[in-house]
Amino acid sequence: MKTMEKLAVIPGEHNLKNYEETAANHDWQHSEKAFSWFETGKVNIAYEAIDRHATTHRKNKVALYYNDGNRKETYSFFDMKRHSNKAANVLKERAELKKGDRVFIFMPRTPELYFSLIGALKIGAIVGPLFEAFMEGAVYDRLMDSEATVIITTPALLSRVPLEKLPHLKTVFVVGENIEETDKILDFNKYFAEASQDFDIEWVDKEDGSILHYTSGSTGAPKGVLQVHYAMVQQYQTAQWVLDLKEDDIYWCTADPGWVTGTAYGIFGPWLNGVTNVVVGGRFSPQAWYGAIEEYGVTVWYSAPTAFRMLMGAGPNIIGKYNLSTLRHVLSVGEPLNPEVVKWGLEILNHRIHDTWWMTETGGHMICNYPSMEIKPGSMGKPVPGIYATIVDDQGNEVPPYTMGNLAIKKGWPAMMRQIWGNPERYESYFLKGEWYVSGDSAFMDEEGYFWFQGRVDDVIMTAGERVGPFEVESKLLEHPDVVEAGVIGKPDPVRGEIIKAFISLREGVEPSEVLEANIRDFVKIGLSAHSAPREIEFRDKLPKTRSGKIMRRVLKAWELDLPAGDLSTMEE
Ligand code: 6R9
């Protein structure tokens, strides 16, 4: 994997021209100058994302192309301003939503989600976006923990909002038709239709809360990660450097706003730059996805390895039916970008796929591949200019190149989380020596400063004295022609400390057998190393994954050891 050839720089005019020079000189205060508050002192991320453009040459420029196969709509920046003003008025007048209050948005991707998210921010409220597949328990945990007073949802999801169990929840807006109102349940569309198009934005402090994403760790309840308005500085700047967004781009981020990618780069990154954003609702299908690229002429596409693998699985014939020639920049996030996917990108999609590493807690890009930089397939790239990333040992000392350790970031970048909601001790526990944010991922750096992901720290396997990153084994397994998904864990073993166990789902039509098992084991032995080959293989129809596509190794481990699996609210159905 590490020996795969470097991919050459893409010729052309890139926003980030000279990585080394920019990295050596960048100061975030320089990026602040892009914003009106740099002079006026009046801060609000919603203003910078939408309203600012509505009084410029971008007034009638398309802000949002929406398509779910059913509804197909187009909104300009001016439309977005008016509709988010209306939403803000509804929330303020009908639910008395105020600055600092928590409001959740629990609905599938529709234009109303975007109007109300921007509208709530205009009030200065803190928005918790919830993925539509959450069940009642997950909704309850998040609203209870944050003492939310308002939720916006749809008729189909209303039954999962346990109104009577949530003492702080005062108002439930339902977006749909023929809504039966009660003293707490209100018909959103009815009030939206009546609401004024004008709204006086609530100016906030740069450090006031904006978005609250809940993430689940390996143990305990989901944690509320609070972002602040100031995150805009980094989201704006990285959308230029990493997404390489320019005025005429048509940009599509496939993530749902229930996950951080769907807010930071599905909303703020493009709109802070006044760039046209595509939102595709509805279910995934290769036809709908390739069709969206062709129909809207998408130029910059941000997705995830799971999605790319699903497209790969659909075969090269389908892709050939679509005109994808507008694409110029393709990016990936969320899990390791397997070399298999890189190869598909080069051979079938005809693009380098640019890996980006970051997390909910970082609020924005951290380590990335840039179009103006050579890519080493399998590496996450280099730190964003202005970010200092390194590898530290468990005591917080930096370690030399090629030493595996904790991937850590020097504290204090613009989009950094500012609180774990209601849990200051937990927040402090992320920072080692008060200086390093410790990500929980293990990685190493090579002599050229490229970072290589190894796994979650708690997932690293120690077998017969060798440290094995499960991701490397999983990547190799995925190259086997019969393997569709693979999850690898360390299973306690009296002799070796741990042995490697692989859970595998096979391509349709392929039956498990001992011969196949031996064949797969040899495949890893030959392709990777003897000590990385799984001693045990178990075939399963499906593997437990989060909705953002991460294999949940802790669930595999729980299956294996007969332990409770912990919080499953983010697991796909
Ligand atoms: C943005 C997002 C964060 C965790 C992170 C890491 C994994 C993200 C990755 C990656 C390998 C990449 N992860 N990007 N692993 N290569 N390029 O995904 O946020 O949902 O909070 O997940 O995802 O383990 O720590 P989040």
Image: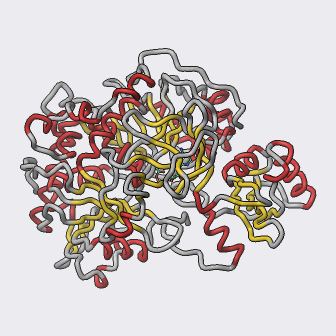
Q: Seen from this angle, which residue lies furthest top?
A: 12
**Residue at x 22% of width, y 36% of height:** 77
With respect to residue 382, does 486 lie above or below? below
- Nearer to me, 297 or 151: 151
**Residue at x 74% of width, y 64% of height:** 540
316 to the left or right of 235? right
Q: Is residue 169 visible?
A: yes
**Residue at x 81% of width, y 73% of height:** 494
- Image location of residue 549, percent across then percent down: 56, 54
Quadrant position of the C terminus in the picture: bottom right
Q: Quadrant of residue 460?
A: bottom right
- Image location of residue 560, percent across then percent down: 71, 73
- Image location of residue 260, percent across then percent down: 40, 52
- Image location of residue 42, percent across then percent down: 10, 43
With respect to residue 38, does 420 lie above or below? below
Q: Is residue 70 visible?
A: no
544 to the left or right of 244? right
With respect to residue 374, does 333 lie above or below? below
With respect to residue 53, does 85 lie above or below? below
Q: Seen from this angle, which residue lies furthest bottom?
A: 164
- Nearer to me, 218 or 389: 389
133 to the left or right of 555? left
